[in-house]
Image: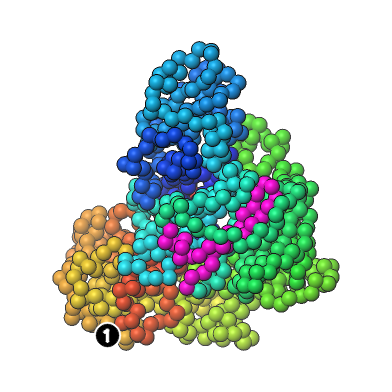
Amino acid sequence: MAPNAGCLLAICTVEGRVKIYRPPFCDFSAEWIEVLDITERLYENLLIIRFGDSDTPSLNYTAGQATDHTGDISNTASRKERKKRKVNKGSRALEDQLSLSTNYKDAKASSFPYSEIKGPTSNMVAEINSNLLGNASRQIVSDFNHEVEPQKEIVENDSVPLIAADQYASRSAILCSLVVAWSPVLHTSKLSPVPNNGTSISLLAVGGKSGNISFWKFHAPDSYTIECGRVLNSAKLIGLLQAHNSWITGISWAVLASDSANPQILLVTGSSDGSVRIWVGDSDVLLNSSDMRDTLFFLLKEVIIVGTAPVSALSVVVPAHSMYTMLLAVGKGSGSFEVWNCDISCHKFDNFGSYNAGSHVVSGLVWAFDGSCLYSCSQDNFVLSWILRGSCLYEEPISSNTIHDKSLSQLPKDLLLSSCGVAVSPGSLVVATVHSLDSDQLDPMYEGRTHKAAVQYLWIGGKQVDFFSKIPSTVDIENFGCSPEKELTYWESNIVWSLKQYEYLDKPLVVWDIIAALLAFKKSESTILEVILIKWLSISFMGSHVGLHAEEVLSRVSTSLSESPSRHLHLLNIICRRVILSDLEADQINSKVHDLQGLCPAEGKHLTKWIEILMSSETELRERLVSFSFSAFLSLTSYSDTSLRQPGYWYPVGLAQMKHWVGLNDDHVRDQVKVLASEFGIHERSGYLRAEHCSYCSAPVSFESPEVGFCQGEGYSSGGYQSHRLSRCAVSMQVCPATPLWFCICCHRWVYRLAPETLFTMSAFPLDLKSSTESTSLAVSSKPLCPFCGILLQRRQPDFLLSSSPV
């Protein structure tokens, strides 16, 4: 949901339909799962208001037939099983005349108000009732004298209202969508009585041929489940905006003053008539809006009134160092694009000029490095890199001279026909472009049937980017070229900058581009890898890059873990596992069985130091989780069990296992945690003393490790017993049941009970645990996150299926 969350995907098809998909995080599938057809919902809502026409005859509609859009949207798949209507021989669909290009065989009966006609034209057509609103079939009204069998029945049937052909065409234009765009996730400024109950939303803007934009509110789920068939979400139409008088061809969002209690939301729209408008909305209004007749946005500025070429692409960015300034790039069908600097605080809009991106339509624009770089692509297969210096853009080479990683392979240029879009990775180190393929270059028997497009990845981390200084526009572009030695320096500063961006908790831990770059340096430039990591560790854990030796920095980091934010510890754990210790299996690291044979003594000593740092970091996170769980239990003992287990609240489980863990690590655990464990021993109830049993043979399981457990099978007393190896939940340390479980693709741990959200937002080990365990802090995280890596959990897929990897 939204570009910075990624749990929902909106797709606008060539037929003008908009559908919502979710990733297969709980399914044994590599394909995304369809959960909602926005076009159907839009049609149902427009029927209620009669498409905004005051003179439209009364529709056969009752309030009881309305669809509740705030319910479960996972039932859309069942609609696919409806009967497909038969097409009379020789008839022609009106949708073809309206250039909607809808395949009749695949169209659902309730999606569009289409009607079949015979003959060249028709002056009146019948309003089509959705199958969701009634059982009326699609019928024909014609004023021609040729034979039409059902005509008499329809004229006599008063339940089928009539609309004019121009009304029919305008309604079809409203339903035909061209572009979609997610807003950033918006958070309410007020505490909800129930945690995570409507406190976060994202808006989906859908623009169509009529110039209208519909806004759909998606609430962040209260909680996730790994069980199939229980994926719930909500979607509701909250507003319509007549943004332009022609087709909507571009939509982009921006948030101003995101750290304030009520940030402003900017919406930038572009049209086929060349106009570009900036709209402003209030965050609280968007969060609380529930009626599609509400006014959500007001026109702030029309930066381009009418252009000679249609708008084909939009991209906006609000630099972090200027909360009220927005950079706007506008791509056009002529092959050029414009850049605008919009200072919203003083209502000042400056044009930074027009630039040529190619000789064909600009198909994509995207900002990178916080607005310092811009990447463009056009349909003539040009992908260009631009750098912003002062108030001018300068073109730069896009290729990298230092990293040559085959995993990000380059495709033959003669195979790529045109560029369809461009995107930048979360860390701004990789740019991805979508290319259509030349069918003549493909094998017609095999490749021609399966290969429709390709995604090409290009390294961009070696750019000379100065994030804060303003260089005059008279700078010589030839000085931007750099040698491989200088490019390594730029890679160093850019990777450190990318890692620093993840200190903001609203940025999800999706660091695959950073990990890929570090692994590439590990293979080719191991010295640079150490320099990058030591510099980041010095800045993040010690406050500044003091220029100390690597061994001294690692030693100081080990002693400062308790004073570091959980986000820093998560990043450190990911880098240790995926980069430094990438040659070791995750299970070997978890079980502390490290095979370092075959390594020279110096390298073995170096890896041992990193392993110790990883173990210390994970122990620190586990200790924070254990102490928070004990403190939460003790602070909630005065409440009844029913009030403790309300939906949306986190409740500590596995306290008996946590107490055992504290006893096993008595020499290393803080005294504060020992005191909490002893207090739990006084208040513990019989339910927490219940022994664990094997889910396969029902034999008892003793607690020996927080990672795994072994049951005491047959022959235990004689010493020759056979036991089952059982995984323990990474959060509760309880033995995992034989049910679907969450899986971390980084540390390969299993999770049955989700961790509290507070664990991921701690700035250090809490000195006052009582205040951190108030009821407002016990909201279960709306996303399943690994307590040791901080990344999204998922259902483990078989080896023959693709799995998404944030790392």
Q: Amino acid at mark 1?
A: Val
Rendering quarter of residue 789 = bottom left
Q: Which residue is mark 1?
A: 675
Is residue 761 visible from the viewing direction of this image? Answer: yes
Q: Quadrant of residue 82?
A: top left
Residue shown at 27% from the left, 85% from the top? 675
Q: As drawn, is 661 to the left or to the right of 267? A: left
Q: Is residue 281 found inside the magenta-colored segment of the image? A: yes
Q: Is residue 586 left or right of residue 197?
A: right
User: Which residue lies at the image location 46% right of the left edge and 55% below the top edge?
Assistant: 294
User: Quick one: label 1, few (<14), some, or many (20+) residues within 10 Å?
Assistant: few
- In front of the other: 144 or 150: 144
Magenta part of the chain: 261-289
Tell me where residue 762 appears, x and y as whole percent: 42, 77
Name the element at disc 1. helix
Is residue 295 rendered magenta in the image? Answer: no
Please provide percent x and percent y for residue 47.
Answer: 44, 40
